[in-house]
Image (spheres, rainbow, N blue to C red):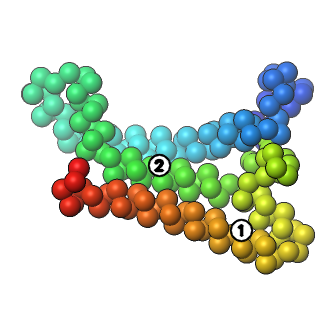
Amino acid sequence: LIVYLLLSRAGPFGVLGLLFTPAAMIIAQVIIITPLIASITHQAMRELWSDYHDLLISLNTTHGQRIATLIWDGRRALMTAALAGFGRAIGEVGAIMIVGGNIDHVTRVLTTAIALETGKGDFALALGLGFVLIALSLCVNLAIHTLSRTEREGRW
């Protein structure tokens, strides 16, 4: 709702004409998923830093080397954060409907199409779109799982 108010004609960014555009939808999604990803990432990196702090300092590593080490060792937690953000974004309907408007061939996405078709009573199409959404989610999760398995097999 805040993004809608900011982007509406009466809002401070209304002159940009972003309301009911894909850009507005992206802005809303970023605002929704950023706290989730940041929270998971911060917690994981803080725990790693407490584990590695003394070692990295004693090895006289540079700031960049410390960050690279933490990112490398925390890559699974970072993938988890990315998946959590993806899951939150892919299931979002409300914010997308408010700032995107569900305009056919412009701002309609799978979740809003499912809501629209359910509202029209076309449950077969809504269910089919739901299966597409689930399949997409499973493919992304399978890809991440495959990436994390490569480490155990010594390819990374």
**Residue 129 shows which numbered tag?**
1
Q: Which residue is mark 2?
A: 82
Left or right for 112, reference 39: right
User: Which quadrant of the figure contains the N terminus?
Assistant: top right
- The amino acid on which the numbered mark 1 sits, given as a three-letter code, is Leu
- The amino acid on which the numbered mark 2 sits, given as a three-letter code, is Ala
Within 10 angstroms of label 1, few (less than 14), some, or many (20 or more) residues? some
Tally of numbered discs: 2
Q: Helix, strand, or loop for circle 2? A: helix
How far across and down, in percent of the image, does residue 120 sit? 90, 69
Within 10 angstroms of label 2, few (less than 14), some, or many (20 or more) residues? many
**Residue 58 shows which numbered tag?**
none
User: Which residue is pictured at 58% across the width and 45% down the height?
Assistant: 33
User: Which residue is pictured at 72% across the width and 59% down the height?
Assistant: 110
Q: Helix, strand, or loop for circle 1? A: helix
How far across and down, in percent of the image, does residue 34 sit? 55, 40
Left or right for 130, reference 75: right
83 or 139: which is nearer to us?
A: 139
Looking at the image, is mark 1 or mark 2 nearer the viewer? Answer: 1
* Residue extending farthest left: 58
